[in-house]
Image (cartoon, coloured by chain):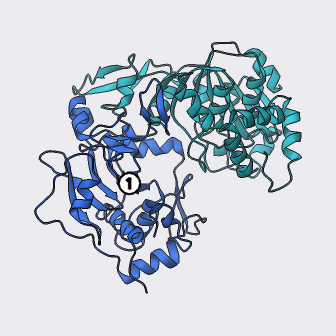
Amino acid sequence: MTEEDVVGRLRPGMTIGIGGWGSRRKPMSLVRAILRSGLTGLTVVSYGGPDVGLLCAAGKVKKLVFGFVSLDSIPLDPLFRAARQQGRIEVAEYDEGMVQLGLYAAATRVPFLPTRAGLGSLVVDTNPGLRMVVDPYGGEELIAMPALKLDAALVHMNRADEQGNAQFLGPDPYFDDLMCAAADEAYVSCEQIVPTEELTKVAHPVTVRISRMLVTGVIEAPNGAHFTSCVPDYGRDEAFQRAYVEAAGEPGRWAAFSRRFLEGSEADYQRAVAALPAGREAS
Amino acid sequence: MTAADRSEVCVIACAEAFRGNGEILAAPIGIIPTIAVRLARHTFEPRLLVTDGEAYIVRGTWAVGSVPEGAVESWLPYRSVFDVVWRGNRHVMMTPSQIDAFGNANISAIGSHARPKAQLLGVRGAPGNTVCHPTSYWVPRHATRVFTPKVDMVSGVGYDNAVKAGPAATRYQQLWRVVSNLASFDWDPGSHRLRLLSVHPGVNVDQVVQATGFDLVIPDDVPVTREPTTEELQLIRDVIDPHGARYREVPA
């Protein structure tokens, strides 16, 4: 599949889970395809990084389900901050562990999972739909974290085969398999599609974290997580991330940055990135 | 060797927060807490577990900003961090933008939740951390806008809000220490209000009171935070922070 094929299967108003964590192994080529599309009114569930900022700035997000948004080496994403500070998006803010439980509930087809996380905090104050549940064995009152059911999951992995068995080669799988399992349809982009036997020729089978039974389609997207990290294939492009943040802080510069990098195709994006002199800033 | 400066005293005060913790995951957020945990593990608290900031728990003592060289002793991807949090084998030290007398802490946003004046990080794991395992806080710039009578929103849960939420929230709650660039604090067990534990060398109690936006519990005798030993100073200056990253949080 291509990024455009995936976006063609998404509909306005869908709930979409985005894999990765902060500014790490984000399915950025799929995010960029959504930026170019007519999709709007999305509910986005994310361990948020620049995916969130970009989608908010492009007016794609109706509601964000999140625990944080960060660029790691730069603590805050200016586009996400602007969207919040201008009141442009609804949010459901949860403890990040609650997000994990919500995805796990959806993946295992139970309506909720109980937790202490969130008790006494803004999570309860600002999510009026959140309900409590009494331990039927003991009597303590816990939060009933509702299943976070996804219409679609978008994740980026290091390798996959044509059938959708997908592998992480860096230190952390993040929540990508859980996102896929919580979704009706899951789309896996990867650095490289390889024959199945290649996946475990050197790496331990435990790295093939996502099974094809969870996956709807596979997209080969070399450098597809740029500018987030995709170790060991590549680290975060810190210079590009700095340029993103600097441009995002000023409407005029942001328009120029968008024209230069985001308005063309993914191939145009990758060409524009490749054309940047090494070590030079992108704006 | 020159005498310890304020940043180095803060390292010691943060390290002391982990004394006696034993075999738990120490989770420092911020530069000085990170230096502190490595120092504590290297010296008086050798059983602590420490991550590389990614997904591995590693041994050894290494410099901030560099790659650890010690052995990887186990794997802790984000997926497993919450298992540790919920089981309680962890002590986190977070950096709040606001904190009140009962230990409610805000890292989420300033202003209203619907439309914040300043959006910050988001709650992250603070709600779960604070009701599941020991929690401490580090404040690099002690001021009334941080030590505030009322936080705009509760990310880390304080004693009063845990009590209101019921036994499930209080059962494992353990607010432990606050360390600022001026002083160290714990919570008075009776009133559950922040209590002055020690003032850093060169700071007097009045300065702390002036910089705090609520009434502190102040004992009759307030000791001075202990100074680093020679060995600790060498460890900070030569091994853990040779490039002076600590001065980005507490200028010399």
Residue B208 vs residue A229, the one in the foreground: B208
**Residue B165 x, y percent position in the rendering:** 25, 29
| Crowd around label 1: few <14 · some 14–19 · many ≥20 (10 Å) | many
- Tell me residue A55's x, y (percent): 66, 27
- Horizontally, residue B202 falls left or right of residue A2, namely left
Q: Position of residue B77 (x, y in %)?
A: 54, 47
The answer to whether any part of residue A84 appears in the image is yes
Residue A141 lies left or right of residue A10; in this view the side is left
Q: Is residue B51 above or below residue B104?
A: below
In the rendered structure, which amino acid carries the disc numbered 1? Val
Q: Is residue A120 above or below residue A148?
A: below
The residue lying at 23 percent from left, 55 percent from top is B209
Q: How many marks?
A: 1
Residue closest to the far top: A12
Could you tell whether A224 is left or right of A47 in the image?
Answer: right
Protein chain holding label 1: B
The hue of chain A in the figure is cyan
Question: To which residue does mark 1 refer?
Answer: B139
Residue A91 at x, y percent in the picture? 50, 23
Q: Secondary structure at mark 1?
A: strand
Q: Quadrant of the N terminus of chain A?
A: top right
Q: Is residue A43 above or below residue B240?
A: above
Residue in view at x 50 percent, y 35 percent: B119
Q: Nearer the viewer, residue A220 or A266?
A: A266
Foreground residue among A134 and B113: B113
- Which quarter of the rendered picture does the C terminus of chain A lie within? top right
Chain B visual colour? blue
Residue B171 appears in view: no
